[in-house]
Amino acid sequence: MYPLNIPGISGEGKLAGEGAPASGTNYEFMFNNDANEKTITRLVSEIPPETAFMFYDEEYPSPSDPGAFVTIKKDSDQYTMQRSNHGWSKNWASISLEDLVGYLSKCTKYNMGSDSMHKMRLYPVPPAPPVPPKKWWQFWR
């Protein structure tokens, strides 16, 4: 089951407790010594719908604690990411598959540990609510 079926990734399976949905789609996982660019490309390109994953970037210049947690979401073939840490977050921004693979490749070494900061997380996200169409009078505002 994704992402534990990708060579170069080790995992601990379903998380229990805080924030774990009934569907059991929360996972903690990490890169192992076999991780390479193919591992990262599969991890990113196979993100299931309505799912996000988060990894750690130790080198990001954070205004609070060191580094940033980077959340990635995929909508069709479009990727968006958001960086955050204690007390702050950046806006969601688009990122190409190639740039995302390159970015995550640079962060591989920070996502290989057994402690919670150095594990990646996979979790469900609700679909974006539909944007209601404008009424005819809203076009004049």
Image: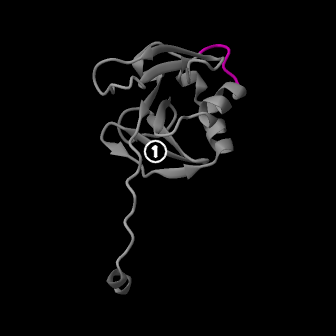
Give the image location of residue 12, x and y in percent: 46, 13
Q: Is residue 35 magenta?
A: yes
Query: Residue at coordinates 30% horizontally, 28% vertically from top-left?
Result: 19
Query: Residue at coordinates 65% horizontally, 43% vertically from top-left?
Result: 97
Q: Is residue 8 above or below residue 136?
A: above
Mark 1 surroundings within 10 Å by alpha-carbon count, few (fewer than 14), some (14 through 19), many (20 or more):
some
Residue 22 sits in quarter: top left
Query: Residue at coordinates 30% horizontally, 41% vertically from top-left?
Result: 87
Q: Which quadrant is the C terminus positioned in?
A: bottom left
In the image shown, does 15 or 115 lie closer to the viewer?
Answer: 15
Q: Please state which amino acid type lies under the numbered disc 1.
A: Gln
Q: Is residue 92 magenta?
A: no
Secondary structure character of the magenta stretch overall = loop
Give the image location of residue 59, x and y in percent: 52, 34
Query: Residue at coordinates 61% horizontally, 29% vertically from top-left?
Result: 43
Read off the magenta span: 32-36
What residue is pinned by disc 1?
A: 82
Residue 20 sits in quarter: top left
